[in-house]
Amino acid sequence: MAQARLNDLARTIIDSNSYMVLGTADQAGHPWVTPVWFASEEYTHFHWVSSPEARHSQNIAARPEVAITVFDSTVPVGGAQAVYMAGAAEELTGAELDRGIEVFGRVSGAKIGRTWALDDVQPPSLFRLYRAAVSEHYVLIAGRDPELGTGVDRRERVTPTSHA
């Protein structure tokens, strides 16, 4: 019961937010975080468009491991809900780019009225399409949660692709 509730919570948080915070590190391990507008595919693949010259894009080229957080920053203090994720990111090319731009274009068309196409993310365009394949998901459990609270905020592993 609790696991199904947490899986639902993760899906709700991801579905109701437009930006994710992307954490990357350069070759030497220096961290960098940046917000990016994203399109989720099955809660396991997160697509975004960026310049390959952006610091986070250069970091991904050097070190593909990423951390991602999706949360609503407009809620009052103490009301935060978040999904924390870990995975690997890459700039998409070839057949992966074809599939990725279909996903990103469909979601961006529905959410913001702008459909992206291959020409928008290939030279001479200044943008490229990136995807993070997420291998771990966690949700924030508030310490005061009436069912799962322990008095201290913590994270709990979830599987948002599972409806069980």
Image (spheres, grey):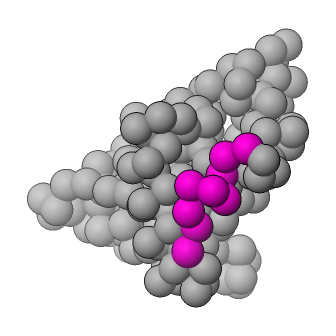
- Nearest the viewer among 133 and 32 is 133
Q: Estimate the x, y position of residue 45 in percent, counting from the top left.
A: 43, 48
Compared to residue 125, the image places residue 6 above or below, namely below
Is the C terminus in the top left, top right, bottom left or bottom right quadrant?
bottom left
- Nearest the viewer among 77 and 136 is 136
Task: Give the residue drawn at x 25%, y 54%.
Answer: 161
Residue 35 part of the magenta segment: no
Residue 120 part of the magenta segment: yes
The total of numbered circles placed on residues is 0
Left or right for 74, reference 137: right
Left or right for 37, reference 97: right
Q: Estimate the x, y position of residue 122 in percent, counting from the top left.
A: 67, 46
Is the N terminus in the top left, top right, bottom left or bottom right quadrant?
bottom left
Which picture quadrant has residue 147?
bottom left
Compared to residue 133, the image places residue 105 above or below, namely below
Q: Estimate the x, y position of residue 101 in percent, counting from the top left.
A: 49, 56
Q: Estimate the x, y position of residue 117 in percent, counting from the top left.
A: 56, 63
Left or right for 131, reference 146: right
Q: Is residue 106 visible?
A: yes
Task: Give the residue drawn at x 81%, y 23%.
Answer: 26
Left or right for 116, reference 45: right
User: In the current view of this chain or complex, which residue is farthest to the top?
Assistant: 28
Provide the residue span drawn in magenta. 115-123
